[in-house]
Image (cartoon, rainbow, N blue to C red):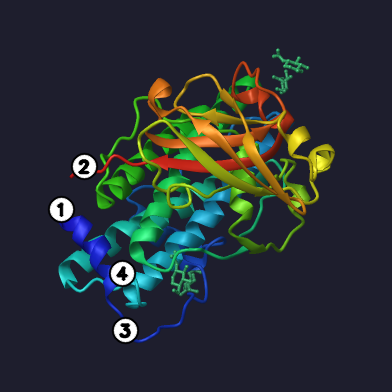
């Protein structure tokens, strides 16, 4: 596939080192003036809705919009950096064919503008109801070549697609049916983006019949791994933040083989109050579980074993039941104190760390 060539070849080229980060977010984001907003909407291929906001939103829905805003701010910064790197031929991001480079930049510039509008939409709801709208933070990205950047885009977009399910359900429970239509439209839009990222990576565009679900606490925790600093107190967003879990198997979880196997994990539980009874004790930690979310299945909990502690860092193993649950695409995992969950909403309250992101890729060729 030609896209595969683009992604693979960029990593092989080397060149003059360009400035590593763009200086500012594009088009006046997060406060574009009318001219800049017009430019964003043109690039995005559509507009912020001109429908009036709902008459009210339940106070319980405010964190839903705050998390969406916080996440979209991260996505804007990520795609802005990616567009910058490709445009400026940063080593690892060089595409040697002018036509292909222009076409990829055209698509990613549009993705960037779409993410800006998603952020402005969520921020607009918050501002309208006099709630705190989180401004962008300073971020760090672990990726230094095109292939890994597209792979990361694919994984975090899948996690977002899972968490927007949680947002839609939360709004419904809170009696805020109005914004559910918009959230559903964003789910479809991000799914279209992800199909493209997956094609670039030589994966079939649609990963599963029912995309893996996730919950707000897991996405908010995961995003902390990209945050260097924020110009506000993170406690202004009342969603818990947990340490994330590293997957040591399958290329850091990004390429786990499609088969039953034992996976190895590591987690730094420093500062987690509920984890203190387990510190240093493999015997105590034997009572813990890895709980998997895959597709729309009920949570699957497996006991952890082969536990080793180094200070407050625990390394452990757990079965990954690929065959029984056909775990292609993204699986989201949590380190939990229970194994009797009746749905995704129950998990966060008894979770010590999450998420671990496990990606099973079925290459097309
Ligand atoms: C918006 O900002 C841009 C860049 O700062 C400026 O060129 C433009 O004149 C501004 N437009 C309006 C309507 O203020
Ligand atoms: C852009 O390139 C810089 C320098 O290699 C890198 O640190 C950064 O993570 C890259 N951005 C993305 C989105 O991969
Ligand atoms: C607001 O949300 C809470 C929590 O979901 C719910 O108990 C309450 O009934 C909602 N209020 C209205 C007016 O729907
Ligand atoms: C799960 O088990 C815990 C303790 O083992 C118990 O407190 C909790 O009520 C159980 N939850 C369900 C949904 O059965």
Is the CB of mark 3 within 8 Å of ligand 2? no
In the displayed structure, would residue 151 be above or below residue 145?
Answer: above
Find disc 3 in the rendering and name its residue.
15
Q: Are marks 1 and 2 in contact (CB under 8 Å)?
A: yes
Instruction: Find out whether the residues at labels 3 and 4 contact each other: C-beta distance under 8 Å.
Output: no
* Earlier residue among tags 1 and 2: 1
Q: Which residue is mark 4?
A: 11
Q: Which residue is mark 2?
A: 364
Q: Residue 11: where, in percent of width, then height?
A: 31, 69
Q: Residues within 10 Å of mark 3 (few under 14, many from 20)?
A: few
The span from disc 2 to disc 3 (Cα, nearest Å) is 31 Å
Residue 124 visible (yes or no): no
Where is mark 1, residue-wise?
Answer: 1
Point out residue 313 in the picture as x, y percentages from the top left corner: 71, 51
Q: Earlier in the sequence, mark 3 or mark 1?
A: 1
Q: Quadrant of the C terminus?
A: top left
> Residue at coordinates 49% horizontally, 34% vertically from top-left?
162
> In the rendered image of this protein, does residue 337 appear above or below residue 127?
above
Q: Residues within 10 Å of mark 1 (few under 14, many from 20)?
A: few
Circle 4 crowding by C-alpha within 10 Å: few under 14, some 14–19, many from 20? some
């Amino acid at each position: 596939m030609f896209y595969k060539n683009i992604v693979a070849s960029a990593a092989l080229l080397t060149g003059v080192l360009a400035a590593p980060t763009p200086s500012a977010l594009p088009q006046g984001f997060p406060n574009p003036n009318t001219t800049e907003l017009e430019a964003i909407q043109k690039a995005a291929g559509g507009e912020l809705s001109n429908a009036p906001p709902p008459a009210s939103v339940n106070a319980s829905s405010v964190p839903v919009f705050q998390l969406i805003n916080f996440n979209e701010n991260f996505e804007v910064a990520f795609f802005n950096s990616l567009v910058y790197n490709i445009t400026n031929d940063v080593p690892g991001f060089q595409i040697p064919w002018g036509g292909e480079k222009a076409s990829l930049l055209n698509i990613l510039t549009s993705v960037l503008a779409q993410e800006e509008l998603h952020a402005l939409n969520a921020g607009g709801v918050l501002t309208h109801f006099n709630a705190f709208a989180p401004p962008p933070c300073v971020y760090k990205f672990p990726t230094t070549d095109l292939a890994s950047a597209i792979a990361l885009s694919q994984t975090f977009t899948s996690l977002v697609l899972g968490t927007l399910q949680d947002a839609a359900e939360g709004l419904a429970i809170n009696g805020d049916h109005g914004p559910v239509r918009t959230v559903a439209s964003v789910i479809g839009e991000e799914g279209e983006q992800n199909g493209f990222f997956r094609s670039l990576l030589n994966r079939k565009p649609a990963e599963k019949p029912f995309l893996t679900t996730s919950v707000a606490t897991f996405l908010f925790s995961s995003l902390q791994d990209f945050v260097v600093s924020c110009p506000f107190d993170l406690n202004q967003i009342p969603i818990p933040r947990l340490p994330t879990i590293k997957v040591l198997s399958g290329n850091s979880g990004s390429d786990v083989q499609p088969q039953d196997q034992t996976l190895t994990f590591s987690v730094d539980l420093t500062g987690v109050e509920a984890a203190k009874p387990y510190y240093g004790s493999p015997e105590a930690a034997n009572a813990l579980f890895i709980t998997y979310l895959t597709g729309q299945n009920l949570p699957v909990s497996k006991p952890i074993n082969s536990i080793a502690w180094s200070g407050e860092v625990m390394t452990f193993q757990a079965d990954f039941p690929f065959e029984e649950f056909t775990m292609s695409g993204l699986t989201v995992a949590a380190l939990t104190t229970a194994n009797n969950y009746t749905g995704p909403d129950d998990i966060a309250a008894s979770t010590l760390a999450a998420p671990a992101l496990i990606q099973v890729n079925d290459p097309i060729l």
